[in-house]
Image (cartoon, grey):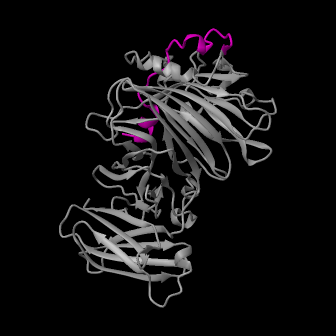
Amino acid sequence: MLRRELLRTGASVPLALALSSAAAADGTPAPFTADTVPALARQLASQPFKAPDESLPADLGKLDYAHYLGIRFKPENALWNGQGLNFTVQFHHRGYLYKDRVDIYQIVNSQALPVRYNPDLFTFGDIRPPTGDIGFAGFRLHFPINRLNYLDEFAAFLGASYFRAVARGQGYGLSARGLAINTAEPTGEEFPLFRSFWLEQPPQGADAITVHALLDSKSASGAFRFVITPGEQTLFDVEARIYPRVDIATIGLAPLTSMFFYGPNSRARTDDWRAAVHDSGGLALRTGHDERIWRPLINSHELQISAFSDVDPRGFGLMQSPRDFVYYQDLEARYEKRPSLWVEPRGNWGQGIVELVEIPSDKEVNDNIVAFWRPHDPLKAKSEFTLSYRLHWCWSEPDPGPVAQVVQTRAGLAWNGVDRQFVIDFAGVPLDAWDKPQPPGLDVGTDKGKIISAVAERNPELRGWRVSIEFATNKQKMVELHARMMDGDKPLTETWIARWTAS
């Protein structure tokens, strides 16, 4: 199963919803206000979920990947092209895995107008163009993010409630999505989808664009507002209103999805010429008590679920690290240029957990990593739940704080051929400035097994320190370890937390 493809196609539910007068479905402009999409979401939530027909002409419904890529949008037909704006919009065609119809509107002077499908907007290669208004599958945004005289694609919304973006100089990698429901549950995951989008036409010279989205699924509907600012970091300021149809306990808010195939800490299952293959190297956390945590990702033979309890978290993210080409050696994929994605909560999120799901994968095309916030209390049916946060598509954590960070983690068999060993490199200002004759202190421990030794030595190649931990598994199937460097009772580094599994 290609999880990356499954996740992006979602529930395959096209839009066949009467959007009342707000939709401007007959082509007549209709008023659009801040309450338009929330009102539609509330209306949806008051009714049983209905999956509209997903039918497509046979030529489109049976496309393989190569032929789908042959359908190309004509750039000269981009929305707002030639109007002197900093943004244009191009559209994704339906077909292959992307069968859901997504209705798209533009907002001009507080009036909503539908963006009409027309086969003349595309070239089809050797595929017969469809007839009629079959709608779009999604869209992508363009902006002069890298060069002043060229509008690069920097963000895309395509498949279920998935969207992704890049910062300046980056290439696409991990994704975000609107909502996750029942992730890794035995009952099977539910994939909400964006059914409609409203794109606000930006004014002349604007460096941000606003997108509204209507979300729907069996368990909930929702209204999303994204204020998107591309640049050195690409920022998504998100306001979400969720309207549950039923009580939802296993909900994931601000969900992130990525790929970890292997790295120096987890490569027992691979035989590959590259040293590492991943879109994200670890989960970073900044707790409500301002502790910094780094959890390196793994690809085990069995499903792994980790929960980090917190109150009012200050941030979490799936981060790509290291950033050196030599670490990946892939001239095509350029994993060192994949975005990191940091979630910055706005307001108090209360009690809950950051949940990390690691799904076994035997291919690098599979999105097998999921992270999200799960509130302590279930979302109640017939209620309104609001959430605000900022997404940073970035190179590194926006505010790493005063402690040194984990640069990389390596793992393998210890010298005696029986025990295991982790080697962690830390680097950052507190360690670079360490001038005492003795090494920094170590706080190292494990929940099972036994720590045999833990030593620290300078790593001049990184202007930091290396911590080597040898531990006995004592025939345990899974062992949790932690480590950090200390100056007395003051942390010098973020807390490294790792899981070792027998598989």
User: In x, y percent, where is residue 411?
Assistant: 36, 69
User: In x, y percent, where is residue 78?
Assistant: 71, 29
Specify whether residue 4 is painted magenta.
yes
Q: Point out the stretch of residues depicted in magenta.
A: 1-30
User: Is 18 displayed left or right of 287 in the figure?
Assistant: right
Judge whether 98 appears above or below 495 on screen. above
User: Is 476 displayed left or right of 143 in the figure?
Assistant: left
Residue closest to the far left: 475
User: Is 481 displayed left or right of 272 in the figure?
Assistant: left
User: In x, y percent, where is residue 409?
Assistant: 42, 68
Decide whether the magenta segment is chiefly helix, strand or loop. loop
Instruction: Please say whether residue 131 is visible from this viewpoint.
Output: no
Position of the N terminus, as image quadrant, is top left
Residue at 37% across / 64% down in the picture? 497
Residue sitting nearer the eye, 233 or 420: 233
Residue at 66% across / 43% down in the picture? 229
Residue sitting nearer the eye, 278 or 405: 405
User: Is 23 displayed left or right of 44 in the figure?
Assistant: right
Instruction: Please say whether residue 254 is visible from this viewpoint.
Output: yes
Residue at 63% across / 18% down in the picture? 117
Specify whether residue 35 is painted magenta.
no
